[in-house]
Amino acid sequence: MSKTNTGAGVSDTSKLVQKLCYHLSGKKKEDAAHFFRLAVRMLFQTPHGDTYMEDEYSITESIKKRLAQTRTEKEVYMFSDLLRKLQTETVLKNYRAILSFLMHVSNTPQISHKSSSSPLRAGLNTSESDSAETIQPTFFGLPRLSSSSLSLSEAASGVPIHVILSSGTDQDWHKDDGGVECSSQSQQSTLHQSSGCHVPPNASLNKSVSSEVPESQLLQELIYSFQGINGKFLKLSPVSQGYILDPKVRVKRSVRRFVLRLAELGWLHNQVRQHCENAAASRTLGLIGQSLIAALRAELTEYYRLVAILQSQIKQQIDTSVDSPLCEEQPLWHTEGLTLCRLAVWTFEPQRHMKCLAAVAEACKNKRGGALASCVHGFLQHGDPVTRDTVKSLLRAVCKPMYIMLSRWILDGELEDPYGEFFIAADLDVKGNLLWHEKYRVLLECTSVEALFMADREGDLQSMMDSAYLETSRRVLDVLTGQYKFLDHLQALRRYLLLGQGDFIRHLMELLEPQLIKPATQLYPHNLSSILESAIRATNAQFEDADILNRLDVRLLEQSPGDTGWDVFTLDYHIDGPIGTIFARNSTAYLMLFNSLWRAKRMEWILSVMWKRQITSAKLLRKLPELGPILQQAHLLTSEMVHFIHQMQYYILFEVLECSWDVLIKQVQQAEALDDIISAHQNFLLAVKAGALLDDNSQELATQLRTVYELILQLQTHEEELHSRSLAELQALLRHEELVEERGNQGQFGTSTHEEELNQKRSQDFKQRYIPSVRTQLRVLNKSYQDVVKKFLLMLASQSDVSLQLLSFRLDFNEHYKRLDSRLTVPLTYQHRRKSLMGSGKNVAGTSQQKVRIK
C-alpha cells in the first residue's frame, strides 16, 4: 500500500473514532480528547491491567448486567442480538476490544468544563488500588505497546500507530485545541496539552511506583520457570507443586496474577518431565511405555526450542537496553522486544499443547502394554482438533511397537514380546499336541463398549488381518489334509475306536474272549497286542495304511478289585504331530465311546452265542423232556434281550453315529480354517456322547441301560450252567443206556441194583431239585428284566428328544410291555412327559406333535 493510501485509510479510521468519542462525550472537546486516548489504548494495545485482561464472556456479562440495572429488558435482548451479529462479521477483527471500550466508556463519569482538573489529572490523583472504579491512565499517557501488539495494529491498518494518532484534517473537532499530535520531541506533553491542562513530569509521581520489579526481570523469571528452574522471585512451591511469586516483590495484583498464569506452563512442563524421568527408571516399562516416553521427550525438545528463542530474545533485549519498571510511562510506538503480553501470545499454543501432554502422562501412570495404548486412544474423543492432532502423534508412536508385534504374529506366526505387553501370551512349557490349544492365550482382561462400535472394520489393518488369516488357514488345511492325511486318520478313528469296521471288531472279540474272561491281574499287553495283529491279518483291516496300523494298539485301564479283562480292555490310537492338535483333547471322549460301544457289542456277541447254543442243543436235549419248559423260558428271555440290544445297536450305530458322521464330513469339507475343523469335530463327539447316553443329561438312562447289561450277564451265567448241567445229564443218561444195551447183548443183566440206585438218584436230583431251581432263577430274572425295561421305556418316552421317544416306540413295537404296565399307555406317557417338561421350565407347546408320532 502506498503512503497516500495508507494515510487516507488511517485518516478515515481516525475520523470515525474521533466522531464516536465526540458524540459519546456530549460534544465536549475535553472529554472527547480523553475518550479518544482511551479508545486508542483499547483498540491498539493489550496492557497489563485487570481492565484489559477480561475475556469476551466477562465483558458481555458485565454489559448485560449494566443494561439490566439501568435499561429495560428489551434493550438487553437487543444487545444480545447485536452481539451475535457482531460475532459473525468478518470485517471486525478486534470486537472484544470494542466491547471493552464501550463498557468502560459507559462506566466513566461525565466531566464538566467547570472541573478544576482534567480527566487525566483526576486519573493521576486517584489511588493506585486495583479496586478503583475510575479509569486510570497507567503510564501517564498512552501506555506501553508490546512488539506483538504493534505488529498486529500495523497489520490491521497498514501503517504505524503514530500515523493514526497524528492524522487528521482541518475540519476535525479538536482543531481549535491544537489537536492530538505526536511529535518526536515530547509526545507525552503534547497529549496532555491537547486536553487543555498541564501535567507534571514523571519525576513528580509517586516514588513507590518506580521501585517495582522491571518487566524484563519478570520475563527472565518466567523463562526460567518454563524450564523448571527456580528464579529469584518466581519459585516452585514444595506444597502445591506450583510456582509462587515472592510476596515481597512489588507488582500490581493484576500483573502478579498474569505472571502466575504464565508460570502454569512451567508447572505443566515439570509434570511431563517428571513422568518421563520416573517411567524411564522403571525396569518393567516395556516397549510401548518407552515409545510414549520417547514421544513425550520429542515434544519437550520442540518446546525447548521455543524457550531458547524466548531466552535469546530477552537476553538481547537486556543487553541492548535498560528496561524501566512496569509503572514508567513510555510512548506506545517506542515499545519493542519481548513483553508479558507478547510472551502470553507466544506461549498460548505451547501451553495448550503442554496441558494435553500432562493430561496424557497423568492418565498413563502405572499402565503398560495395551492398557497404556488404550488410555492414550481415549484422548482422541476430544473436541479440540489441535488436541486430537497432538494425541494422534503420541498414539502413532505408542502403537508402533504394537503394530510390529501384531504384524510378526499375523504374517510370520512369531511372538516377540519380551515385556509381556502384547495381548497374546505364550506358555513355553506347553509342548506337543496341545500347542494350538494351550500354547497361547489372550490377555484382554476387559473390552470397553466403545471398542465394539468404534473399531474400523474396513481399515487397512483389518483387511491385512483378514487376508493373512484366510491365506494361513488355507495353507494349514492343505498341509493337514495332504501331507498329514487328516481325513484318513479321522476315518481310522471311526472304524476302530467307534467300531465302524464290523468284521474286524467281531473277530477281535472272538479271539480276545479266552483272555478277557480272566481276572484283570492276569492280562499282559504283549499277549493282547499279538491277538490284535492276528485279527488285523485275518480281516479287511490288513489292507489299511501302514501308518494307521502302526498307531493302532491295545491299552489296559486302571484296575479295580474283581475286574476282569472285559472291564479294563480298550483299543487305543496313538495321535501325534500336527493332527494331534485336533484329537489331543478328545482322547478321553474316544475312550468313553469305545468302552460304551464295546460293552454293547459284547452284549450282542453274548446273546448271539447263547442263541446259537440254544438252537444247536435243542435236538440233543429232546431226550430230556423235563427241560422243555425251562429251555423255552430261557429262549424267550434271550429273544427279548436280543431284540433290545439290536434296537439299541441300531440306534447308536446308525441314527447317532452315522448321522453325526455325515454332518462332520460336510463341515470338514466346508471348513475355511483349522478352528472350524476343531469345532466341527468337538460338536461331533458331543452329539455322539449325547446319543450314546454318556452326557450329563443321560445319567439315569445310562444307569438303567447298564442294569439291562447286568441282567444279560446273569442270563449268560444261568444259561451256561443249564447247558453244561443238561449236557452232563444227557451224557450220563446215554452212558447208562449204552451200558444196558451192551450188557444185554452179552446176555447179562442191564444194570446192577447199586448202579440203578445211583442212576435214579442222579436223575431225581436233576429233575426234582436242579430244574425247579433253574426255573425259579429264570422266573426271577425275567421279572427283573421286565421291570427294568419297562422303567427304561418310561424314561425314554418322557425325554424331550424325539429320537429317544422313537427309540422307546421301537423297543416296544408290538406293545408287549404296554400290556404289562398301564403307565406306558400313550396318554399317561404324554402326561408324564408334560409334567417332566414343566418341571424343567421348558415349553410343552410342541409336545402334541410328538404324541402323534408316538401313537
Image (cartoon, rainbow, N blue to C red):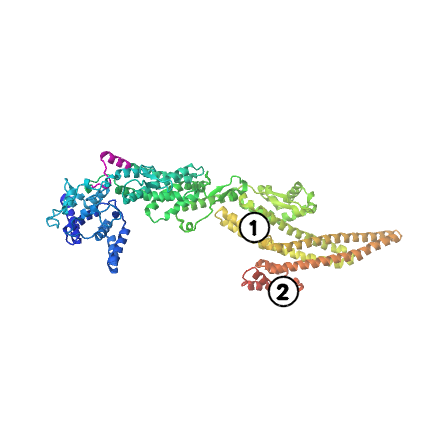
State the count of labels.
Answer: 2
Q: Position of residue 345 (x, y in %)?
A: 27, 43
Q: Secondary structure at mark 1?
A: helix
**Can residue 688 be seen in the rendering of this structure?**
yes
Give the extent of the magenta segment. 309-329
Is 111 one of the magenta-colored residues? no
Q: Position of residue 120 (x, y in %)?
A: 18, 47
- Residue 635 is labelled as none
Direction from residue 585 to residue 569 in the image, left or right: right
Q: Does the CB distance between marks 2 and 1 fall below 8 Å?
A: no
Cα separation between marks 2 and 1: 34 Å
The amino acid beneath tag 1 is Leu
Q: Which residue is painted at 67% across and 63% down in the image?
A: 820
Quadrant of the rendered structure where residue 541 is? top right
- Residue 825 is labelled as 2
| Image quarter of the N terminus | top left
Q: Position of residue 735 (x, y in %)?
A: 82, 51
Residue underneath mark 1:
685
Q: Position of residue 629 (x, y in %)?
A: 75, 59
Name the residue furthest top.
319
**Neighbourhood count class around disc 2 (C-alpha, 10 Å): few under 14, some 14–19, many 20 upward:** some
* Front position in the image: 735 or 564: 564
Q: Earlier in the sequence, mark 2 or mark 1?
A: 1
The amino acid beneath tag 2 is Thr
Is 539 placed above or below 26 here? above
* Front position in the image: 641 or 747: 641
Is 833 placed above or below 532 here? below
Direction from residue 557 to residue 664 in the image, left or right: left
| Image quarter of the C terminus | bottom right
* Front position in the image: 93 or 721: 93
Q: Secondary structure at mark 2?
A: loop
Name the residue furthest bottom.
827
